[in-house]
Amino acid sequence: MKDRPDHVLWLLFFINKAKQTNNEVAAKMIQKVVESDIFRIVEAKPYPEDYTETTNVAQREVKDNAIPELSSHV
């Protein structure tokens, strides 16, 4: 990935971390603006399919300052 400011990388992280809906479209739009590669972030342990369960897991991660293990790296 080209050198980009941290805030751009975090934005791409946020977009790809959420459940896939319009996120891929948004990531591609950002990709064109910042002229970057897209790296799909996939957790080693997938989030639950249920929205409420997913938000519960995410809230615990934020509270614990946890960073999920990823299945691949840049």
Image (cartoon, rainbow, N blue to C red):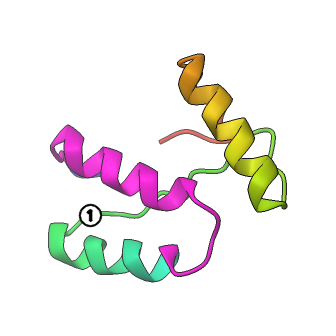
Q: Name which residue lies at 75% across and 60% down.
A: 51
Q: Main structural element of the magenta stretch: helix, strand or loop? A: helix
Does residue 4 belong to the magenta stretch? yes
Front-most of 59 and 20? 59
Q: Name which residue lies at 18% across and 47% down.
A: 4
Q: Name which residue lies at 30% across and 47% down.
A: 9
Give the residue furthest to the top. 64
The percent position of residue 43, horizontal first and vertical second, equals 69, 43
The percent position of residue 33, horizontal first and vertical second, equals 17, 75
The secondary structure type at the circle numbered 1 is loop
Q: Name which residue lies at 19% across and 69% down.
A: 35
**What residue is shown with label 1?**
36
Q: Give the side of residue 2 with respect to residue 25, left or right.
A: left
Q: Give the side of residue 38 with respect to residue 5, left or right.
A: right
Does residue 17 belong to the magenta stretch? yes
Residue 74 visible somewhere in the drawing: yes
**CA neighbours of label 1 inside 10 A, class few (<14), some (14 to 19), many (20+):** some
Determine the image quadrant of residue 69.
top right
Q: Amino acid at mark 1?
A: Ser
> What is the magenta range?
3-23
